[in-house]
Image (cartoon, grey):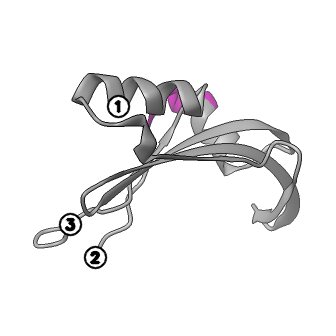
């Protein structure tokens, strides 16, 4: 079903977005200048989850590597939502693939 498609924006649930992005740069010899950090911990995002409007607070670190953009997603607070549920169940793991 996913043949001939390429993932270009994997999202990875982590417990410290900036630290994991920096470690990824160090591991692969990438410049940390490639990291874009977005702290949404003081600004709630209103999202719909299981039919309810809930608030979610996240920190994101995005790392661009050629055509591939990794999103490291850190849940920091708010109502229980898909990010928190996923992290609680699976821990640090790939969670999102956007296919083209």
Residue nearest the viewer, comparing 32 with 79: 32
Q: Quadrant of residue 76?
A: top right
Whether residue 36 appears in magenta in the rendering, the answer is no
Please give the range of residues in magenta.
Answer: 88-94
Could you say where residue 52 lies in the image, as x and y percent from the top left? 86, 64
42 left or right of 75?
Answer: right
Task: Classify mark 2: residues with Cα within 10 Å, few (<14), some (14-19) or many (20+).
Answer: few
Residue 22 or 8: which is nearer the viewer? 22
**Mark 2 highlights which residue?**
100
Residue 94 visible in the displayed image: no
Question: Element under label 3?
Answer: loop
User: Along the horizontal axis of the image, is 79 left or right of 40?
Assistant: right
Viewer-nearest residue: 66 or 97: 66
Query: What SS does tag 1 mark?
Result: helix
In this rendering, the answer to whether 48 lies above or below 89 is below
In the rendered picture of this protein, how many numbered marks are placed on residues? 3
Proximity of marks 2 and 3: CB atoms separated by less than 8 Å = yes
Label 1 vs label 3: CA separation? 22 Å
Q: Nearer the viewer, mark 1 or mark 2?
A: 1
Who's the residue at 28% across and 76% down the image? 100
Disc 1 target residue: 25
How far separated are the C-alphas under marks 2 and 3?
Answer: 6 Å
Point out the tag, 1 or 3, that comes first from the N-terminus: 3
- Comparing marks 1 and 3, which lies closer to the viewer? 1
Residue 46, x across and y down, in percent = 84, 64
Front residue of 20/78: it is 20
Q: Residue at x 33, y 23 (%)?
A: 26
The N terminus lies in which quarter of the figure? bottom left
Question: What secondary structure is found at the residue carrying circle 2?
Answer: loop
Q: Which residue is mark 3?
A: 6
């Amino acid at each position: 079903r996913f043949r001939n498609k390429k993932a270009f924006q994997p999202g990875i649930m982590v417990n410290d977005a900036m630290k994991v992005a920096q470690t990824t740069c160090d591991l692969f010899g990438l410049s940390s200048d490639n990291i874009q950090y977005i702290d949404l911990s003081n600004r709630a995002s209103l999202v719909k989850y299981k039919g309810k409007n809930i608030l979610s607070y996240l920190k994101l670190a995005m790392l661009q590597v050629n055509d591939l953009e990794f999103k490291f997603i850190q849940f920091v607070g708010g109502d229980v939502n898909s990010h928190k549920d996923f992290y609680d169940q699976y821990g640090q793991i790939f969670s999102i693939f956007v296919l083209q």
